[in-house]
Image (cartoon, grey):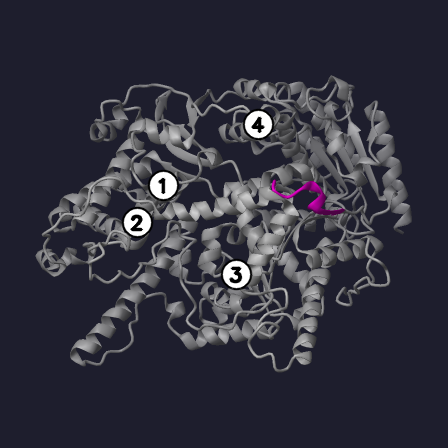
């Protein structure tokens, strides 16, 4: 605890803070002073967001005042050390080198090893492609271009020669790198005006745009809204205002179309420039490209307007862009350099390619990650890659067609790389089609006539996969460099689309018709992403091979997928650069799991951890573990018994009773959409649903996230209307509503169900992830393997593993795991439970009942193979939890609880 005499003050907090909020702010302030990694836990509904804003931004202001004082004391210091160009703790290379040495001394040699791994990864980029050298005596580039028909000239690749392939006597100038990316979100486009980089910046990120919007709303209530320059970053799908582009709907296609428009604009501008230089003919400015980016002056006005207004969220930026007629996506990106506070989603900050594209400079700045309870899994999921059989066929066919058309006109280097790409696509197709004879063309053409077969999915280590496909001699790093610099993705896909249009190929052969997979360019990018994944260390992830098969005359497309399993190397890049990284959440425990998966080099005693209780009084919550239903039947929602008609009927009878005693709104969380649908249909047929709707209207969470807001609004309006808040309505027959929601979906995270919207939360069973999920099993085995290596230091087999896709096989893997793997599986479940039940209590005057409906919440822990779920509940719930003996006790407790609260609130 910080000494009261020297404790920082937080005048930016808009009202009198509670004691736990003061403790939280002091702890965060101290963490920023010390730097490094911190984890701060504060239950949902305790004003966590406001505490983060008031503490972190106050620290920034205090640091600036200290720096100004130093500058005043040393007015003649100029641009050297101690000048106002940088804060005193934020120096250039020499000082950073000293800080790195200090980190290694502080955290031990393991940190140094992690740091050196990063260096070794960079060194890998200098490897050479094994094999053929350059051919001599080729035609000149101009002769080749002249030999091509005028209509196809735009698709011919320029002569390619990378810097390390040129001989010492070569006088060829280095080719300008073409800004082609491996993914649509990682293009490298700088702003047109170089703004002064702010000396100290805070990056605040969270999972969803709705959570970021909530952060902006809280920020507006503070004095920092006027004192800080704030910019929100979002995706093109959320910020694009070009109606023609937005109409594409799919995120991938929106990204592609946007980049295509920018590329056309650059190319046409170059043509205009060349025309002026060569002939002196005057022409008007090129009009191609996106119309929302043609007026540079309006973009500047947009930036000025954003900084002059109160902090704007994504929706506000989009509306301002529409009003001014200029692009809010590129407008907000160009403001990052001048901003004090950058608000952005996880993906944009945690993905290195996105950071580079957006120009995010983390060096000696502050990174705050909110909703960090699933950070490790979210981080590694960002680095997964996948390419489908259909995409591979598309890329292979386009490459073949392009190579046949331009083969005699391409230089030896271009020919060699294109042939290498075809070898790779053939190898990938072979493994997906299980084709041992190599007759891929016939296999692809006759796929509809394939005989019925079934096969198991399987996984392999990277090295095993490369060796088995006989592609281990290909230098993927250099090939990826060629893809990025040569512009081959756009040339090949452009020619392929033109060929398809001229040949009038039926729509079902054109991948562009499939919105879920995007265009030919998307398929090419999927291949590049997969190749990039194959350059990772052998132990960092696994390759999943799901082969094409026909079952019951239904085609199931195959795919290759790389699943990243280790986030240590990725996260170390952020920790190495930033002055401080702060992980914030409502429930972050167990912290040891997070430490081992994200920053294992950090000794436990060097990790700053803070946790506080809840602001609500103990008597404002009523958590009950419900073991039996109204008829006395035991609630067992394990996978094997939850779908029995008796179990679904007992749950319905429980709801029939709850609607008579719980006022206003009840939210029921199911383990999955499929199970919720099964239960709902059973209630319809049995008449239970009709009994429930006589007392409360029933709403269901939609699968489409776009429809969630409208359902939530109607649910809220119904509660307001039918619960007696409106005196004109007689509530004798119907009061309030029930919302059937799903754990892990939109309503379970980041949604405010305060007051009447969530007077009772019903958690149906324990939402364990499906043990048939091949990715989950690989992750569990990887985590469990860490434990084994620590115990016996034995080597781990990298041979491939078969998966039947059945639940029984998954349970067999779980049973064979040690305590570490099982605990991870249990933690996934209970983190989801804690997030869901945390939706209800949102402020100090709120109150709610929480029903954990399953006998496993009350069973004897000594009889369980895994940890008891109750031990992983938040402390503020665990301290009040009551295990029921019969439903009669549950009903009486609820009746007394709500009667008391109704009396107190009058």
- Neighbour class for label 1 at 10 Å: few (<14), some, many (≥20)? some
- The spot of residue 579 in percent (x, y) is 62, 57
Do the residues under discs 2 and 4 have CB atoms within 8 angstroms? no
Closest to the observer, 582 or 186: 582
Q: CA distance from mark 4 to mark 3?
A: 36 Å
Q: Secondary structure at mark 4?
A: helix
Magenta stretch encompasses residue 666: no
Left or right of residue 479: residue 498? left
* Marks 1/4: CA–CA distance: 29 Å
Query: Alpha-carbon distance for marks 1 and 3?
Result: 27 Å
Find disc 2 in the rendering and name its residue. Answer: 483
- Residue under label 3, please give it: 361
Q: Position of residue 266 (x, y in %)?
A: 31, 66
- Mark 4 or 3: in front is 4
Q: Which residue was labeled with disc 1?
A: 531
Task: Where is residue 25? Give x, y as percent.
Answer: 76, 57
**Are the residues tagged 2 and 1 within 8 Å (C-beta)?**
yes
Q: Residues in magenta?
A: 599-610
- Residue at horizontal 28%, vertical 55%? 163
Question: Answer yes or no: do the residues labelled 4 and 3 have beta carbons within 8 Å?
Answer: no
Choose between 188 and 217: the one closer to the eye.
188
Whether residue 505 appears in this view of the structure is: no
Q: Report the residue marked by disc 4.
A: 789
Q: Earlier in the sequence, mark 4 or mark 3?
A: 3
Q: Is residue 411 left or right of residue 388?
A: left
Q: Quadrant of residue 261?
A: bottom left
How many numbered marks does the figure carry? Answer: 4
């Amino acid at each position: 605890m910080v000494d009261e005499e020297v404790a920082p003050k937080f005048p930016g907090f808009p009202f009198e803070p509670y004691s736990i909020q003061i403790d939280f702010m002091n702890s965060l302030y101290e963490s920023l002073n010390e730097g490094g990694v911190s984890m701060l836990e504060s239950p949902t509904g305790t004003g966590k967001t406001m505490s983060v804003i008031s503490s972190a931004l106050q620290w920034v202001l205090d640091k600036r005042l200290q720096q100004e004082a130093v500058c005043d004391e040393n007015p003649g210091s100029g641009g050297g050390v101690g000048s106002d160009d940088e804060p005193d703790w934020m120096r250039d290379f020499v000082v950073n080198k000293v800080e790195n040495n200090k980190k290694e001394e502080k955290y031990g040699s393991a940190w140094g090893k992690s740091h050196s791994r990063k260096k070794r990864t960079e060194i890998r980029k200098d490897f050479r492609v094994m094999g053929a050298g350059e051919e001599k005596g080729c035609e000149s580039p101009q002769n080749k271009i002249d030999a091509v028909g005028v209509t196809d000239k735009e698709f011919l690749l320029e002569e390619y020669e990378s810097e390390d392939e040129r001989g010492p006597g070569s006088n060829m100038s280095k080719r300008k790198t073409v800004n082609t990316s491996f993914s649509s979100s990682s293009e490298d486009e700088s702003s047109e005006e170089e703004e002064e980089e702010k000396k100290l910046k805070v990056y605040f990120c969270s999972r969803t745009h709705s959570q970021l919007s909530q952060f902006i709303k809280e920020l507006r209530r503070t004095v920092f809204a006027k004192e800080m320059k704030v910019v929100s970053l979002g995706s093109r799908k959320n910020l694009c205002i070009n109606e023609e582009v937005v109409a594409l709907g799919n995120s991938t296609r929106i990204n592609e179309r946007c980049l295509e428009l920018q590329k056309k604009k650059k190319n046409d501008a170059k043509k205009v420039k060349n025309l002026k230089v060569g002939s002196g003919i005057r022409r008007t400015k090129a009009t191609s490209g996106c119309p929302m980016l043609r007026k540079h002056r309006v973009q500047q006005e947009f930036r000025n307007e954003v900084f002059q207004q109160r902090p704007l969220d994504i929706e506000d930026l989009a509306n301002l862009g529409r009003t001014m007629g200029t692009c809010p996506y590129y407008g907000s990106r160009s403001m990052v350099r001048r901003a004090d506070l950058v608000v952005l989603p996880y993906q944009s900050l945690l993905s290195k390619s996105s950071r580079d594209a957006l120009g995010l400079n983390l060096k000696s700045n502050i990174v705050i990650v909110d909703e960090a309870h699933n950070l490790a899994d979210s981080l590694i999921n960002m680095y997964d890659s996948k390419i489908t059989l259909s995409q591979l066929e598309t890329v292979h066919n386009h490459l073949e067609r392009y190579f046949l058309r331009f083969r005699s006109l391409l230089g030896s280097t271009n020919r060699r790389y294109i042939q290498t790409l075809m070898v790779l696509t053939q190898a990938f197709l072979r493994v997906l089609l299980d084709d041992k004879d190599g007759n891929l063309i016939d296999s692809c053409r006759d796929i509809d006539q394939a005989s019925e077969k079934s096969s198991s999915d399987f996984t392999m280590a990277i090295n095993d996969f490369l060796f088995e496909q006989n592609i281990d001699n290909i230098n993927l790093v250099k090939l990826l460099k060629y893809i990025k610099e040569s512009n081959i993705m756009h040339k090949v896909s452009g020619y392929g689309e033109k060929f398809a249009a001229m040949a009038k190929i039926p729509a079902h052969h054109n991948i562009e018709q499939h919105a879920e997979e995007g265009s030919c360019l998307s398929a090419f990018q999927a291949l590049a992403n997969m190749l990039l994944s194959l350059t990772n260390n052998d132990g960092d992830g696994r390759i999943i091979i799901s082969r094409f098969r026909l079952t019951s005359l239904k085609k199931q497309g195959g795919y290759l997928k790389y699943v990243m399993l280790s986030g240590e190397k990725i996260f170390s890049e952020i920790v190495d650069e930033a002055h401080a990284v702060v992980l914030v959440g409502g429930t972050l425990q167990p912290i040891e799991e997070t430490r081992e998966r994200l920053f294992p080099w950090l000794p436990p005693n060097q990790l700053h951890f803070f946790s506080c209780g809840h602001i609500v009084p103990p008597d404002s919550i009523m958590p009950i573990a419900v073991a039996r239903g109204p008829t006395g039947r035991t609630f067992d929602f394990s996978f094997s018994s939850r779908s029995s008609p008796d179990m679904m009927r007992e749950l319905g009878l429980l709801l029939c009773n709850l609607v008579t005693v719980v006022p206003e709104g009840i939210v029921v969380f199911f383990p999955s959409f499929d199970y919720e649908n099964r239960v709902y249909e059973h209630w319809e047929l049995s008449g239970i649903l009709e009994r429930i709707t006589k007392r409360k209207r029933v709403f269901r969470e939609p699968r489409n996230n776009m429809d969630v807001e409208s359902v939530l609004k109607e649910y809220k309006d119904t509660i307001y209307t039918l619960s007696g808040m409106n005196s004109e309505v007689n509530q004798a027959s119907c009061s309030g509503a029930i919302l059937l929601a799903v754990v892990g979906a939109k309503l379970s995270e980041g949604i405010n169900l305060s007051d009447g919207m969530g007077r009772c939360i019903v958690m149906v069973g324990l939402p364990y992830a499906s043990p048939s999920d091949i990715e989950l099993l690989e992750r569990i085995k990887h985590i469990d393997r860490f434990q084994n290596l620590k115990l016996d230091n034995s080597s781990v087999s990298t041979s491939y593993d078969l998966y039947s896709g059945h639940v029984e096989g998954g349970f067999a893997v779980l049973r064979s795991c040690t305590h570490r793997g099982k605990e991870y599986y249990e933690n996934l479940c209970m983190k989801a439970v804690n997030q869901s039940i945390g939706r209800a209590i949102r402020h100090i005057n709120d109150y709610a009942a929480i029903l954990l409906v399953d006998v496993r919440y009350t069973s004897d822990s000594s009889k369980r193979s895994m940890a008891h779920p109750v031990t992983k509940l938040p402390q503020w719930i665990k301290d009040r939890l009551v295990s029921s003996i019969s439903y009669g006790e549950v009903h009486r407790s609820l009746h007394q609880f709500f009667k008391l609260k109704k009396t107190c609130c009058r």
